[in-house]
Image (cartoon, rainbow, N blue to C red):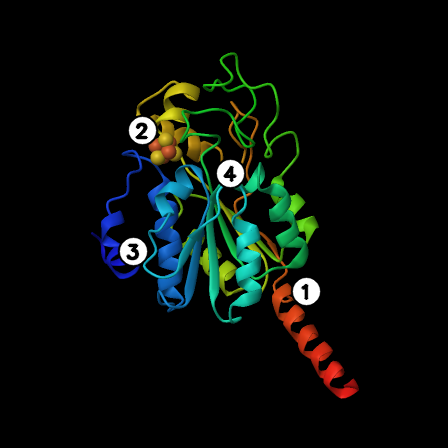
């Protein structure tokens, strides 16, 4: 077990049950590195997990307080906790692309609108991989999946000039970034900024699913080939096969520009109580 896992994770959850070669472990390692580099302990963080591969690997893994909110409901639970917990307690949510950009999208947008102080790390594997590889909201158009044997017809949230992060920016998020799981300290730095932000932050990390997306959509079990395809998505000229060109790095940084929801709600409640006392 490596030192980070020993320090922050429950021993019985190590090693993880992710497939060999899956990029998910690298995504979670970046979150742990960010926590460590910020000098945070297990007492300082409450960790929430969603469903799917990302949720399964992080469920009850954190040594400190943690919770699960499946099928996009993790944001509603986090909102209640944010209001109930002291402001200095960090709330970090690790979710998949379905939890974030599909079934949970409306909850997510409301967190951004409120500028709720939570950090969402979206581990995106381009579809419903834990249930066998059905297409989802970021699956590139045209790719064969378990539920699209002739290729997907609809564009993903990252194609045709649409970027899901723009939607979140317009909804009021104050920190947004995107990275691939292959990146090192740059991705960790974005997660650190997200955790330190007193407002709504989301870091979108795209990682290779070598089992379903690789084997079915890319028709390869060769990990090096799959990794090269993913890395191509981030090239300056994009990946010609998908028409996708991801903007990598910090996407939107408006930290400190808007009041944070839970703090302003608490201040307002105190004012109302004070006025009620004065008028009693
Ligand atoms: S199914 Fe894909 S995303 Fe899920 S653990 Fe295996 S390789 Fe990773």
Percent across and percent down for residue 159 are: 61, 31
Q: Nearer the viewer, mark 4 or mark 2?
A: 4
Residue 3 falls left or right of residue 114: left
Give the crowd class for mark 4: few <14, some 14-19, many >=20 residues within 10 Å. many
| 103, above or below 46, in the image | above
What's the residue at 49%, 13% (across, down)? 149
Q: CA distance from mark 2 to mark 3?
A: 27 Å
Which numbered circle lies on residue 258?
Answer: 1
Give the crowd class for mark 1: few <14, some 14-19, many >=20 residues within 10 Å. some
Which numbered circle lies on residue 95?
Answer: none
Element assignment for label 4: helix
State the residue position of label 3.
9
Q: CA distance from mark 2 to mark 1?
A: 43 Å
Q: Earlier in the sequence, mark 4 or mark 2?
A: 4
Q: CA distance from mark 3 to mark 1?
A: 34 Å
**Residue at the far left in the pictured view:** 1
Q: Nearer the viewer, residue 54 or 165?
A: 54
* Residue 36, image quadrant: bottom left
Residue 89 falls left or right of residue 153: left
What's the residue at 47%, 68% (across, down)? 89
Q: CA distance from mark 3 to mark 4?
A: 23 Å
- State which image quarter holds ligand 1: top left
**Can the viewer see residue 181 in this picture?**
no
Pointers 2 and 1 in contact (CB under 8 A)?
A: no
State the residue position of label 4.
97
Give the crowd class for mark 3: few <14, some 14-19, many >=20 residues within 10 Å. many
Percent across and percent down for residue 73 are: 54, 46
């Amino acid at each position: 077990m490596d030192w980070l896992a020993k320090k922050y994770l429950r021993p019985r959850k190590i090693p993880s049950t992710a497939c060999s070669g899956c990029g998910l472990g690298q995504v979670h390692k970046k979150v742990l590195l960010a926590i460590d580099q910020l000098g945070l302990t297990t007492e300082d963080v409450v960790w929430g997990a969603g469903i799917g591969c990302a949720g399964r690997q992080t469920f009850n893994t954190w040594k400190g307080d943690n919770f699960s909110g499946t099928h996009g409901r993790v944001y509603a639970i986090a909102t209640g906790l944010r209001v109930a917990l002291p402001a200095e307690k960090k709330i970090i949510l690790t979710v998949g692309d379905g939890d974030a950009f599909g079934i949970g999208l409306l909850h997510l947008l409301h967190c951004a609108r409120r500028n709720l102080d939570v950090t969402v790390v979206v581990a995106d594997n381009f579809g419903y991989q834990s249930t066998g590889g059905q297409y989802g909201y970021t699956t590139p158009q045209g790719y064969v999946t378990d539920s699209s044997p002739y290729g997907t017809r609809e564009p993903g949230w990252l194609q045709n000039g649409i970027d899901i992060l723009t939607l979140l920016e317009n909804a009021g998020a104050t920190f947004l970034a995107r990275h691939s799981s292959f990146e090192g300290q740059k991705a960790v730095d974005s997660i650190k900024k997200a955790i330190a932000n007193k407002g709504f932050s989301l870091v979108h990390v795209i990682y290779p699913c070598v089992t379903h997306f690789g084997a079915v959509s890319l028709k390869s079990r060769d990990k090096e080939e799959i990794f090269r395809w993913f890395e191509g998505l981030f090239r300056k000229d994009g990946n010609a096969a998908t028409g996708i060109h991801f903007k990598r790095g910090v996407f939107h940084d408006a930290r400190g520009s808007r009041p944070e929801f839970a703090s302003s709600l608490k201040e307002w409640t105190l004012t109302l109580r004070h006025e009620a006392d004065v008028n009693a």
